[in-house]
Amino acid sequence: MSRPVGIGVIGSTSTVARLAVVPAIERSRACVLAATASRSDASATYRSYEAILEDPAVEAVYIPLPNSLHRQWTERAAAAGRHVLCEKPLAPTAGDALAMAQACEAAGVRLMEAYMTHFHPRDRRLRRLVASGLLGEVIFASSAFTGVLDRPDDHRWHPEMGGGALLDVGIYCLSPLLSAFGVGPREAGSVEAVSTALRTGGSGVDASFSGWLGFGGGRAASFQCSFEAPERQQLELVGTSAALSLERPFTPGPEDRSIRLVRRDGTVESLSTEGADPYLAMVDHFAAVVRGRAEPERPPEDSVGLQRLVDRLLRSASVDRPGEAR
Ligand SMILES: NC(=O)c1ccc[n+]([C@@H]2O[C@H](COP(=O)([O-])OP(=O)(O)OC[C@H]3O[C@@H](n4cnc5c(N)ncnc54)[C@H](OP(=O)(O)O)[C@@H]3O)[C@@H](O)[C@H]2O)c1
């Protein structure tokens, strides 16, 4: 194996960094935690985000900042010649996400969105099952990701920080709905029709957002996401031959190993898959991409494509967002 990729964390007190991604970097044999930068933690290697970009041991940065800061720090990292693993969503708008992708390409560094679900073996199996035609013609799909966000000062409640339920948890709901209908993230614009409903909260962000996507021929998907409803995750894909559903589809862990299959005749099976820490698989893949040992499984163009659908949904719900081109 090649030399481990030195990763610096920008905003190291972030919850997802502390609980999931830094432990994964520490367990990985493909990367190493080279340094941390924090505004608020005196024990971090650096107290300024700028300084970590000058550390020669830092070949790549992981950015778990509020969404509105992703573009600025990705562009700075790219200008300093550092590869970037940036938290989801890449940015609050498709325009910002595209600018990030272009900045990284121009600087000759890799950019990857830290969208870990995709790297769990059960998610891979689900995509293979759908692609195999097991479901027959897919006619319905539905997803939900809700949970209570009861910290009023959290950046997710603020529009200028790129807050809102759709950007935070809704993006998990959208990807599997598109793939169920054979639509890749880059073709998300080909969704025929969208319809939306929202409740606002905080300083005007979407506290609850639900939507309907029409794929033509009577085929449709629906989703719900919320900061003000009990913790739930659901995914169900329904075709003319069979239906598939999963528990905890979006933040699976090593123990999430089954997919429920209901066949046309009503028989029910539990398909078992492997479990894994998707954060570890994600950082391993990022390191392989940085070293040129793998092509990105989810390139930035996919993240930008999905973001275009998010923009369309937010426009359809008349959500005003700082910085979005109309
Ligand atoms: N992939 C996943 O499973 C997952 C899960 C949750 C969140 N996320 C994503 O990760 C990102 C961060 O989410 P989080 O829940 O980790 O957030 P968080 O706990 O609030 O951490 C964000 C960190 O950003 C830094 N920061 C810099 N400027 C800030 C500002 N003006 N306000 C608040 N924090 C600021 C702070 O670190 P320092 O003080 O150390 O500099 C802070 O601890 C978001 O993009 C979110 O969508 C991903």
Image: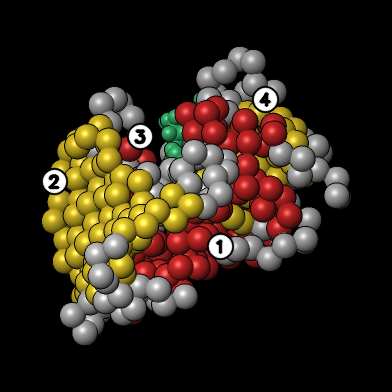
State the image coordinates of residue 57 (x, y, percent, origin top left). 80, 37
Report if the beta carbon of the residue with label 3 is closer than 8 angstroms to ligand 1.
Answer: yes
**In the depicted structure, whether residue 211 falls above or below residue 224:** below
Is the C-beta separation of discs 3 and 4 under 8 Å? Answer: no
- What residue is at 72 percent from the left and 50 percent from the top? 287
Label 3 or label 2, whichever comes before in sequence order: 3
Name the residue carrying label 4: 46
- What residue is at 56 percent from the left and 62 percent from the top? 298
- Looking at the rendered structure, which numbered label has been put on residue 298? 1
Report if the beta carbon of the residue with label 4 is closer than 8 angstroms to ligand 1.
Answer: no
**In the depicted structure, whether residue 175 falls above or below residue 280:** below
The amino acid pointed to by label 1 is: Arg
Which of the colour schemes (rainbow, by chain, secondary structure, one colour) is used? secondary structure
- What residue is at 21 percent from the left and 84 percent from the top? 217
Name the residue carrying label 2: 199
The amino acid pointed to by label 2 is: Arg
Where residue 7 sits, quadrant-wise, is top right
- For the residue pair 126 and 280, the one nearer the viewer reads as 126
Name the residue carrying label 3: 155
Which image quarter is the C terminus in? bottom left
Is the C-beta separation of discs 1 and 4 under 8 Å? Answer: no
